[in-house]
Image (spheres, rainbow, N blue to C red):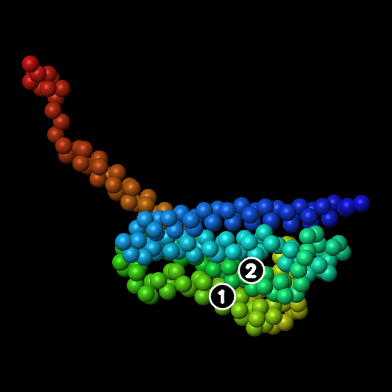
Amino acid sequence: MTSSLERSIFARIIAAKVSGALSMIGSFLIIIDVAKKWRRRKNQGTIPTVSRIILGMSLADLWNSFFVHFLGTWMVPNEILDEGFPIPLTAGNKATCTVQAYFSSAFSLAGSGTNATLAFTYWLIVCRGKEERDLKNWKWQLLLVYLPWILGLADGTTSVIGFGFHEYNYLWFCDTLSESDSPNKLIRTGGVALLAALINISIIVLMCLLIRFVYVYEKKADAFSRLVQMSIPSFPFSLSLSLSP
């Protein structure tokens, strides 16, 4: 007889696959939309910086959803047990577990990083008046477009290939975790946790600054509009009637 724990494990795995499939569809549609807009404006040069960041974010989410959420336990070794029960829908081995752990680390960090750089880019445009020609500078392109991918690929390479951190995380996929409480594991876990906290805090701070800027701007615009209305002389309604034939 199937226990409630086995059913909950199976439901968790199926939910991850369904959510991964939906996320893949959404990211794919965004990529198609960016590609269509770029083809329509080929004569205007390269893709705008904001669109490039959104494209990179969608690519990271697409591949992360595919390898981590949709494939999920299909890449997990079938000899692993979860709470003493066989893990449903496992069809992998150590090699596929290593590949999944690498992509989980690389694409997760790349996706989070592009979220932060997108918020930073909007802050630069709205609050600091940066224009597209300013953002086309290679330094801005390196920081806003390429740095999240560099960090993600570097984290995946050092954690999986360098230190061999990969094992089933008892959720639905293989993650970049060490099989022992080694100093390298503690250093990497602390570093990733700190980086994730900085990324999330930076996104919150930047969005708050954007909201504050828009609020102040709208308040000033409203005050200016009222001042203009007060400065325009109004003619009595009777005068308009007297001028009529």
Please state if 239 lies on the left or on the right of 164 as rendered.
left
Please state if 105 lies on the left or on the right of 121 as rendered.
right
Instruction: Tell me the tag on residue 153.
Output: 1
Residue 235, horizontal then vertical, whole percent: 13, 28
Number of residues whose C-alpha sits closer than 10 Å to that of mark 1, classed few (under 14), some (14–19) or many (20 or more): many
Q: Quadrant of the C terminus?
A: top left
**Disc 1 marks which amino acid?**
Leu
Q: Which of 140 and 75 is in front in this view?
A: 75
- Quarter of the image for residue 141 reads bottom left
- Quarter of the image for residue 42 reads bottom left
The answer to whether one can see residue 162 in this image is yes
Q: Farthest residue toward the right? A: 1
The answer to whether one can see residue 209 in this image is no
**Disc 2 marks which amino acid?**
Ser
Please state if 80 lies on the left or on the right of 199 as rendered.
right
In this rendering, the answer to whether 38 lies above or below 77 is above
- Quarter of the image for residue 136 reads bottom left
Residue pictured at 76% horizontal, 77% vertical:
179
Residue 10, horizontal then vertical, whole percent: 78, 55
Residue pictured at 34% horizontal, 58% vertical:
41
Instruction: Tell me the tag on residue 3.
Output: none
Q: Farthest residue toward the top? A: 245
Residue corresponding to mark 2 = 104
Please state if 16 lies on the left or on the right of 64 as rendered.
right
Residue pictured at 12% horizontal, 18% vertical:
241
Secondary structure under badge 1? helix
Q: Which of 195 and 82 is in front in this view?
A: 82
Q: Nearer the viewer, residue 201 or 138?
A: 138
Residue 11, horizontal then vertical, whole percent: 76, 52
Residue 196, horizontal then vertical, whole percent: 57, 68
**Circle 2/circle 1 CB separation < 8 Å:** no
